[in-house]
């Protein structure tokens, strides 16, 4: 007897609760989508930064190698000069 009286009321509460949960799920999904987009943007920025760092490292490596080669040439010329001097003084 009472269950027939409270049935519409119970249904109304469960619909309201379900609607609230559905709205909350929708809101959380929107937030998740926004965070995924933001994360993808950060990832792209980090990839660009790392690419720039790699290019800079390669440039520095080439410059350092050029310096090392020049120093080796200078040392070789100095050694050759000293050898020539020693030979000339004999």
Image: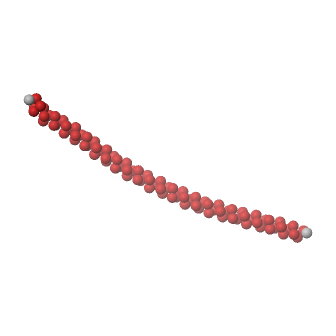
Q: Residue at x 77, y 67 (%)?
A: 77
The colour scheme of the drawn protein is secondary structure
In-image side of 90 versus 72 (left or right): right
Residue at 8% of width from left, 29% of height from top?
1
Q: Is residue 73 above or below residue 49?
A: below
Number of labels in the image equals 0
Q: Residue at x 44, y 53 (%)?
A: 43
Left or right position of 73 against 37: right
* For residue 50, side relative to residue 7 (left or right): right
Where on the picture, by quarter, is residue 61?
bottom right
* Residue lying farthest to the right in this orientation: 90
x, y percent for residue 87: 87, 69
The correct choice, above or below, for 39 with respect to 90 in the image is above
The picture places residue 36, in percent across and down from the top left corner, at 37, 50
Residue furthest toward the top?
Answer: 2
Quarter of the figure with residue 62:
bottom right
Q: Quadrant of the C terminus?
A: bottom right
Q: Position of residue 68 (x, y in %)?
A: 69, 62
Give the residue drawn at x 76%, y 64%. 75
Farthest residue to the left: give it: 1
Q: Is residue 16 left or right of residue 77?
A: left
Give how far across and how far down residue 88 sits, in percent: 88, 70
């Amino acid at each position: 007897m009472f269950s027939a009286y409270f049935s519409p009321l119970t249904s109304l509460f469960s619909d309201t609760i379900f609607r609230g949960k559905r709205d909350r799920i929708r809101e959380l999904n929107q937030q998740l989508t926004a965070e995924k987009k933001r994360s993808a943007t950060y990832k792209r920025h980090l990839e660009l930064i790392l690419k720039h760092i790699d290019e800079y490292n390669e440039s520095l490596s080439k410059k350092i190698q050029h310096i090392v080669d020049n120093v080796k040439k200078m040392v070789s010329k100095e050694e050759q000069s000293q050898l020539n001097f020693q030979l000339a003084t004999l």
